[in-house]
Image (spheres, helix red, strand yellow):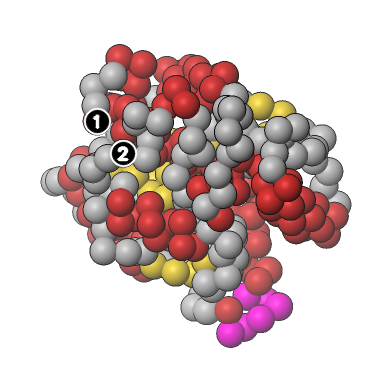
């Protein structure tokens, strides 16, 4: 079910801001969340349950608005990367580029929030050499970009971050929790979803905010893949940032949003839906429209 049809059939839905990760593009995101789950099931029937895309599974509950990253995808590691950071970046990039080749897509129009080599710091636990600082201006640009998107497309009920997007969501929510004026636009988010998330890299300007010193007080759901290189980082985020006991669930894939949303994920969103529309029942509405 497409977003337009969902909007027509189900006008009372949660509105969620989606912050993707690096190597993001509109066509790639749509394919990975809508078509890939069914293709995976066709190639491997043991992949799990009935295979459906995000709109088909959640379209009656949620309208997702994807805010693509603010910067053009960088083809090489950050120039001041350590050897470990550069190796990490090239390993991730090789996998993504192989995926793009299979889809006959190029990375010319893809986006990232910051150079992916920086992600090695929170994911693999590396440190920067003495005297080296990360470029705060890329986060400044990301915040300005998201603020403008929210002003244009909001208000939103919640935020969903994938990979780098989850790290950026962590910063937005932590800044809002502290009441900092630069993050006032993020105070509207009532809940969060982190997929393959990890802590914000150690940008000096934002170290006092992210990762937060104490768990944030808002409902959250954390998902990672069984073969996800950020699985442990996402679990750490779930516990330390959101106060969860661990991951909310694990899908069978790797570092991806290409999975069928589970009954547990839907139940979490349905609970948040009822907080916004307490007098309504989305499931009964769904059944009524199917009968009609």
- Disc 2: which residue: 212
Q: Is residue 8 visible?
A: no
Give neighbour class at mark 2: few <14, some 14-19, many 20+ (Cα, 10 Å).
Answer: many
Name of the residue lying farthest toward the left: 279
Give neighbour class at mark 1: few <14, some 14-19, many 20+ (Cα, 10 Å).
Answer: some
Q: Is residue 206 magenta?
A: no
Up the image or down, 281 lies above or below 181; here it is below
Q: Is residue 44 magenta?
A: yes
- What residue is rendered at 59% in x and 58% in y? 256
Up the image or down, 10 lies above or below 287; here it is above
Up the image or down, 230 lies above or below 190; here it is below
Give the prevailing secondary structure in the magenta stretch. Answer: helix
Tell me the CA gap for discs 2 and 1. Answer: 9 Å
Q: Is residue 281 visible?
A: yes
> Quick one: 104 or 126, which is closer to the camera?
126
- What residue is rendered at 66% in x and 35% in y? 115
Residue range highlighted in magenta:
41-46
């Amino acid at each position: 079910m497409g977003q337009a049809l969902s909007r027509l059939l189900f006008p009372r839905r949660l509105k969620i801001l989606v912050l993707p990760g690096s190597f993001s593009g509109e066509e790639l995101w749509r394919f990975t969340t809508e078509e890939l789950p069914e293709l995976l099931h066709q190639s491997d029937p043991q992949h799990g349950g009935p295979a459906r895309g995000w709109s088909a599974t959640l379209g009656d509950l949620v309208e997702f608005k994807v805010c693509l990253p603010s910067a053009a995808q960088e083809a090489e590691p950050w120039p001041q990367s350590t050897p470990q950071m550069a190796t990490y970046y090239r390993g991730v990039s090789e996998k993504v580029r192989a995926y793009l080749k299979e889809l006959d897509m190029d990375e010319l129009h893809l986006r990232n929030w910051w150079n992916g080599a920086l992600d090695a710091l929170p994911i693999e636990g590396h440190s920067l050499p003495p005297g080296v600082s990360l470029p705060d201006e890329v986060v400044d640009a990301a915040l300005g970009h998201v603020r403008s998107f929210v002003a244009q497309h909001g208000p939103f009920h919640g935020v969903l971050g994938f990979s780098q997007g989850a790290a950026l969501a962590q910063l937005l929510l932590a800044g809002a929790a502290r009441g900092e004026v630069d993050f006032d636009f993020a105070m509207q988010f009532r809940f969060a979803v982190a997929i393959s998330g990890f802590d914000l890299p150690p940008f000096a300007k934002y170290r006092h905010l992210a990762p937060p010193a104490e768990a944030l007080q808002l409902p959250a759901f954390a998902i990672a893949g069984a073969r996800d290189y950020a699985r442990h980082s996402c679990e750490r985020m779930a516990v330390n940032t959101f106060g969860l006991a661990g991951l909310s669930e694990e899908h069978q894939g790797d570092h991806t949003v290409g999975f069928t949303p589970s009954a547990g994920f839907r139940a979490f969103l349905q609970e948040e839906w009822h907080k916004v529309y307490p007098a309504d029942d989305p499931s009964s509405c769904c059944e009524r429209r199917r009968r009609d």
